[in-house]
Amino acid sequence: MAVESTLDVQLIAASTFHMPTGVDWEVDAEATDAEAIVEFAGRACYETWDKPNPHTRANDAYLRHIIDVGHDALLEHATATVYIRGLSRAAGNELLRHRHLSFSQLSQRFVHSGDGEVIVPDVIAEDESLHRMFLAAVDEARFVHDELLHALEENLASEPNALLRAKKARQAARAILPNATETRFVVTGNFRAWREFIAARASEHADVEIRTLAIACLELLREASPVLFSDFLISELADGTRMATSPYV
């Protein structure tokens, strides 16, 4: 029987700043490592280590000025990595379109999920009859997949390499699995790429599942840099889902 999975996103890595020697500059105590990196990169362009402009002397003011004037290239020096579970392969295909992010995805050729974890769209989960119909269809697809996999393994019995035999069978049988099948990702991106992803996918016009992912990422990235993601405003739509927008992207 299909097992329903829910979205889980965790921040597993973020940039660390190390103050170089021979530079007469102090990092604001309130700045995170990512925020210090971005400010340092900007000041390194002109070597304004003495912070001559009082309006951008503080780290948060400097970073907000960068976003305001569109110097987004500086944000590429700070990066963050998240681990995503409980995402459908349909939403995963949309995520992969953001080519400035870097991906490592769960392999269906090597990992066989006997439980058949799936993501049920909210609009289906909210209706009892649709929910039953959906899970029944998933169970049927999983049954056919398992039967097909078993038959393929028998047909490939002459292949002496067990690993190659399993790969060939699984890569053929997986074609019948539904788009609702759960996938998992490790995703790394610089802050410019993350902001572009959030701007595109946290919009009210985006699919609900990937919009939920984008907002979850936004909330995590605010831990790494409250300032550089503070311009995104999260609000609730009439259907109870959330969206996020920024005037700068």
Image (cartoon, rainbow, N blue to C red):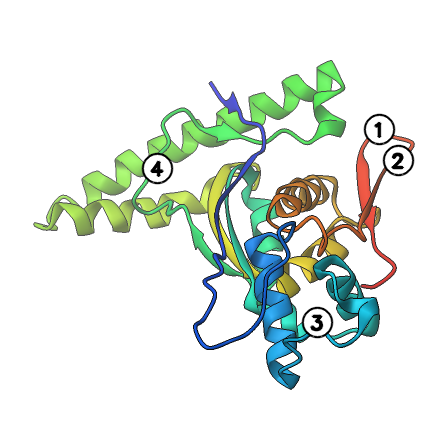
CA distance separating discs 3 and 2: 29 Å
Q: Amino acid at mark 2?
A: Leu
- Please report the residue visible at 23 percent of the width from the left and 44 percent of the height from the top: 166
Where is residue 163? Give x, y as percent: 17, 47
- Please report the residue visible at 57 percent of the width from the left and 65 percent of the height from the top: 37
Residue 148's disc number: 4
Mark 1 lies on residue: 240
Task: Please say if the residues under marks 2 and 4 sit with CB atoms less than 8 Å apart.
Answer: no
Mark 2 lies on residue: 237
CA distance separating discs 4 and 3: 50 Å
Circle nearer the viewer, 1 or 4: 1
- Please report the residue visible at 83 percent of the width from the left and 63 percent of the height from the top: 248
Task: Please say if the residues under marks 3 and 2 sit with CB atoms less than 8 Å apart.
Answer: no
Residue 228 in view (yes/no) = yes
CA distance separating discs 2 and 4: 43 Å
Name the outermost residue toward the bottom: 46
Where is residue 59? Give x, y as percent: 70, 60
CA distance separating discs 1 and 2: 5 Å
Q: Amino acid at mark 4?
A: Leu
| Marks 2 and 4, the one that precedes in the sequence | 4
Residue 97 in view (yes/no) = no
Mark 3 lies on residue: 72
